[in-house]
Image: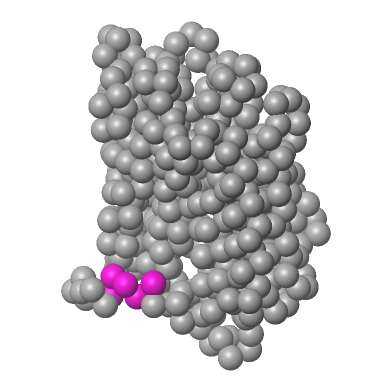
Amino acid sequence: MSQDGLAALWRLSDFVRWWFARLAATTAGQMVMVAVGWQMYDVTSSAWDLGLVGLFQFVPALVLTLPAGHLADRLHRARIVAGVMVLQLAIVAVLFAASRGGWASRELLLATSVLLGVARAFQMPAQQALTPLLVPPRLLTQAMAVSMSGLQVAIIGGPALAGAIFVAGAAAVYAVCAAFFAIAFALVLRVRYEHAPPPAEPATLRTVLAGLHFIFSRPALLGAVSLDLFAVLLGGAIALLPMYAKDILHVGAFGLGLLRAAPAAGALAMSVALARWPLARRVGAKLLAAVAVFGAATVVFGVSTDFATSLVALAVTGAADMVSVVVRQSLVALETPDPMRGRVSAVNSIFIGASNQLGEFESGATAAWWGPVGSVVVGGVGTVLVAIAWWRLFPALARRDRVEPPAPAGPALNRR
């Protein structure tokens, strides 16, 4: 990443405002998830209920994300994100009042999880499709790298900050979250870009599903996105971190914050490394190898009873996952014409949501049957097996040499 490119990016005021808005909103979102997870386990002491928090976020996202992607291709994307910030601000205000008043029940936490899922269904497609509109094409790769670095800083800082504040109570965490969402809302409202409303077109099933058809027509892109889904679905242990912090590692709320932050710390280190030494050749093989490493590190975390070892294992999972993120986002950005970015981003969001929220449900359910250690270890082994299977199921991905699309797909890049 050149210094000239970085300097040029920071001179783009709308991109800078967008970068800080995402930093504030992501920090708040991570803090909310730590607080909700800890409160749920504190109220119910149930692995099943921890899994339900993820499921109740995933279902509305699954239902609404594709229509939200269509909306993002027709309306002003920054205004959509601003509206989502208002909804999340209202959610944390209710959680603040419930925590202060002592009526934060299991039912309330599940209901707010549904609303958070609704918010993210509309946020993700508009958010992913907005960055390319704020920078010139020559700076797009650098802008995505800078955005990912900021995102990982928020993912690291949010859980750690939530864990530190939680000693003053859940209400204090939600109060800080409300302040961050308010800041994000104010910044997003000031983001400007040239928005030309597209020609009038009815929202048919064909137009809504256009992003899905686009991804399924490109085997390498489909393999990369689906690989991420199954790898994190099986290998994710995030939902069980409250159990590990409380019952296995005995490190309390502050330790939980550090455990939540560890994968992001590894991801941040990897994002910096990839910015300095980008994946130039054999990107498909490196992607599959990274997923296998993700699964192996998950197994190490699952059997560990040492806090330091657990942190290192989680950091390795984050570093390996960042390789997947960089390859996937680069493929989407380089192969998708702008009029379809919202819908393609919506499909990508569904895969991300399935791998995270549905993965949390899978972890909670299997932990209820086999215990947390059995759940994490089996999931990690399954992830390694998925990486091996994808090598044969998606040869176009395994043989992919560069991130840039092959020559026949070149004309699509000019449709902006």
Q: Residue at x 46, y 37 (%)?
A: 369
Q: Is residue 208 magenta?
A: yes
Q: Is residue 381 magenta?
A: no
Residue found at the very far front of the displayed protein: 370
Q: Is residue 235 left or right of residue 79?
A: right
What colour-coding does the image apply?
Answer: one colour
Q: Position of residue 299 (x, y in %)?
A: 67, 43
Q: Residue at x 74, y 65 (%)?
A: 286
Q: Position of residue 148 (x, y in %)?
A: 61, 49
Q: Which quarter of the picture shows residue 200?
A: bottom left
Name above or below for residue 195 compared with residue 38.
Answer: below
Q: Which residues are magenta?
A: 207-212
Q: Is residue 102 left or right of residue 164?
A: left
Q: Using the image as rendered, state which of residue 409 and residue 387 is in the foreground.
A: 387
Q: Using the image as rendered, state which of residue 22 and residue 265 is in the foreground.
A: 265
Name above or below for residue 24 compared with residue 73.
Answer: above
Q: Position of residue 140 (x, y in %)?
A: 60, 63
Name above or below for residue 371 compared with residue 223.
Answer: above
Q: Quadrant of the N terminus?
A: bottom right
Q: Using the image as rendered, state which of residue 405 and residue 13 is in the foreground.
A: 405
- Which secondary structure type mostly characterizes the magenta part of the structure? helix
Q: Is residue 35 left or right of residue 207?
A: right
Q: Using the image as rendered, state which of residue 9 and residue 322 is in the foreground.
A: 322
Q: Residue at x 73, y 25 (%)?
A: 306
Residue found at the very far right of the displayed protein: 277
Q: Residue at x 44, y 30 (%)?
A: 47
**Would residue 162 be seen by someone viewing this image from the given angle?**
yes
Residue found at the very far bottom of the displayed protein: 408
**Would residue 7 be seen by someone viewing this image from the given angle?**
no
Name above or below for residue 95 compared with residue 372.
Answer: above
